[in-house]
């Protein structure tokens, strides 16, 4: 079960980091695109949408990263964090659904519960 726990932890860290990167690219990309429009209203709308969207993506990704790091350290609280993020990930069809089903199987497994400390 240790291998499965490590895979789930690394999977959450990697996908959380990718989502964080996407949030930063969204914020910077729409902000720069807004500047190039030359229109004050357009630049405000695009810049605001980019920053808000970027903040939302980073806020969604942080629990995944923190939970993944905690799971690598075998902390019980990380299991609960990743159960919630994996339950939300079920709605990210098709890849997110498959990965979340795997993560939930690992996180609810009796062997995982015994591995955790805290």
Image (cartoon, helix red, strand yellow):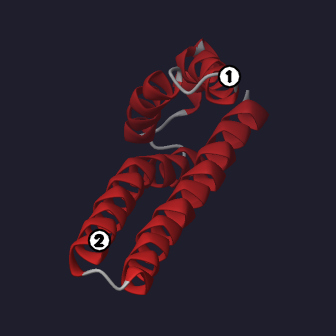
For the residue carrying disc 2, how many other residues have a C-alpha within 10 Å: few (<14), some (14-19), or many (20+)? Answer: some
Q: Position of residue 64 (x, y in %)?
A: 48, 47
Furthest residue to the right? 3
Give the quadrant of the C terminus.
Answer: top left
Measured in 3D between alpha carbons, the distance from the residue under mark 1 to the one under mark 2, in whole angstroms, is 35 Å
Figure check: 16 above or below 85: below
* Residue appearing at x 46%, y 38% in the figure: 117
Label 2 residue SS:
helix
Figure check: 3 above or below 54: above
Q: Position of residue 35 (x, y in %)?
A: 38, 85
Specify whether 111 is left or right of 85: right
* In the foreground, 66 or 111: 66
Q: Which residue is mark 1?
A: 94
* In the foreground, 39 or 12: 39
Specify whether 6 is left or right of 28: right
* Residue appearing at x 26%, y 66% in the figure: 45
Specify whether 95 is left or right of 43: right
Q: Position of residue 90 (x, y in %)?
A: 53, 20
Of the image marks 1 and 2, the number of the one nearer the N terminus: 2
Q: Position of residue 104 (x, y in %)?
A: 56, 20
* Residue appearing at x 67%, y 35% in the figure: 5
Label 1 residue SS:
loop
Q: Which residue is mark 2?
A: 42
Give the quadrant of the N terminus.
Answer: top right
Residue 66 found in image quarter: bottom left
Figure check: 93 above or below 24: above
């Amino acid at each position: 079960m240790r291998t499965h726990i490590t895979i789930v932890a690394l999977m959450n860290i990697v996908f959380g980091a990718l989502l964080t990167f996407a949030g930063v690219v969204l914020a910077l990309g729409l902000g720069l695109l807004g500047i190039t429009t030359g229109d004050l209203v357009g630049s405000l709308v695009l810049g605001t949408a980019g920053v808000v969207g970027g903040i939302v993506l980073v806020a969604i990704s942080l629990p995944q990263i923190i939970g993944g790091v905690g799971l690598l350290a075998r902390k019980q609280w990380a299991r609960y964090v990743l159960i919630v993020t994996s339950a939300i990930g079920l709605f990210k069809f098709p890849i997110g659904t498959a990965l979340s089903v795997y993560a939930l199987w690992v996180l609810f497994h009796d062997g995982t519960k015994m591995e955790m400390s805290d």
